Every structure is written in C-alpha cells, then in structure tokens.
C-alpha cells in the first residue's frame, strides 16, 4: 500500500545514509517482525490445544451414538432419520477439520 503511493524514481534512490527506502523500512521494523513471530507462535499453540480438545470430544461423540443401537442388527436406531444423518455428517466434518488443523 505505502509502496504504491510513492514516486517510482524515489524507490531506487538512497538517503543521506546510503540506504534505499526498503532497506530503511526493514531496519526500522525489525522489532515488529520479532513481535509478529512471537504472536504467531502463541496463536498456533492455542489453536493446537483447541483442536486437540475438539478431536477428543468428536471422537467420543462418534462412538457414543444417540439413541443407541438395535440389539438384533447392531445398526443405530435412528439410522434412517434426517437429523441423525446431519449429526453424523457434522461430527465427521468437525473431526476431520480438527485433525487437519
């Protein structure tokens, strides 16, 4: 954004210290880059913990079938209900997306 507002000839010119605008910007913002890296590492750690918790819950939900199973066939009692299908699909999607995160 800032780069687009400047005059093209100035982008390649040096200041009194012999530095181009990009070099000066990089030098002045080193601490900001380090702070951004720390923030990214903290965010990644938090997301990993949340993902692991969701995986644990979804894994348990996948094996604890609502309504139970039919004693003779072993299939879930609500197998042909639309809400049960929606539950299974949403459980599978959340388990997959939590695992990939």
Image (spheres, rainbow, N blue to C red):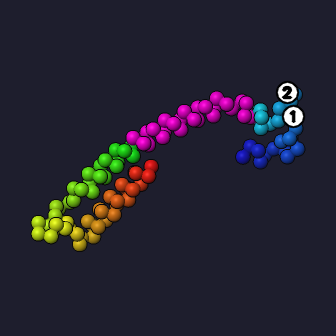
The vertical placement of 40 against 84, above or below, is: above
The vertical placement of 48 against 73, above or below, is: above
Q: Residue at x 51, y 36 (%)?
A: 41
Q: Position of residue 14 (x, y in %)?
A: 87, 34
Report the residue that reaches farthest toward the bottom.
80
Please tell me in which quadrant of the rendered image residue 97 appears: bottom left
Is residue 1 magenta-colored?
A: no
Question: What residue is shown with label 2?
Answer: 17
- Examine the residues drawn in magenta and state their main secondary structure: helix
Q: Position of residue 34 (x, y in %)?
A: 61, 31
The vertical placement of 88 against 61, above or below, is: below
Circle 2/circle 1 CB separation < 8 Å: yes
Instruction: Compare residues 38 and 10 and report the one nearer the observer.
Output: 38
Q: Which mark is residue 14?
A: 1
Q: What are the residue bounds of the magenta stretch? A: 25-49
Q: Secondary structure at mark 1?
A: loop
Q: Residue at x 77, y 34 (%)?
A: 23
The vertical placement of 86 against 100, above or below, is: below
Marks 2/1: CA–CA distance: 7 Å
Instruction: Compare residues 89 and 1 and report the one nearer the observer.
Output: 89
Q: Secondary structure at mark 2?
A: loop
């Amino acid at each position: 954004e800032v780069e687009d507002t400047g005059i093209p000839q100035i982008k390649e010119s040096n200041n009194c210290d012999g530095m181009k605008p990009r070099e000066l910007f990089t030098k002045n913002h080193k601490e900001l880059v380090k702070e951004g890296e720390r923030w990214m590492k903290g965010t990644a750690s938090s997301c990993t913990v949340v993902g692991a918790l969701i995986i644990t819950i979804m894994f348990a939900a996948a094996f604890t079938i609502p309504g139970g199973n039919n004693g003779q066939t072993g299939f879930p009692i609500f197998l042909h209900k639309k809400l049960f299908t929606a539950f299974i699909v949403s459980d599978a999607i959340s388990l997959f997306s939590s695992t990939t995160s």
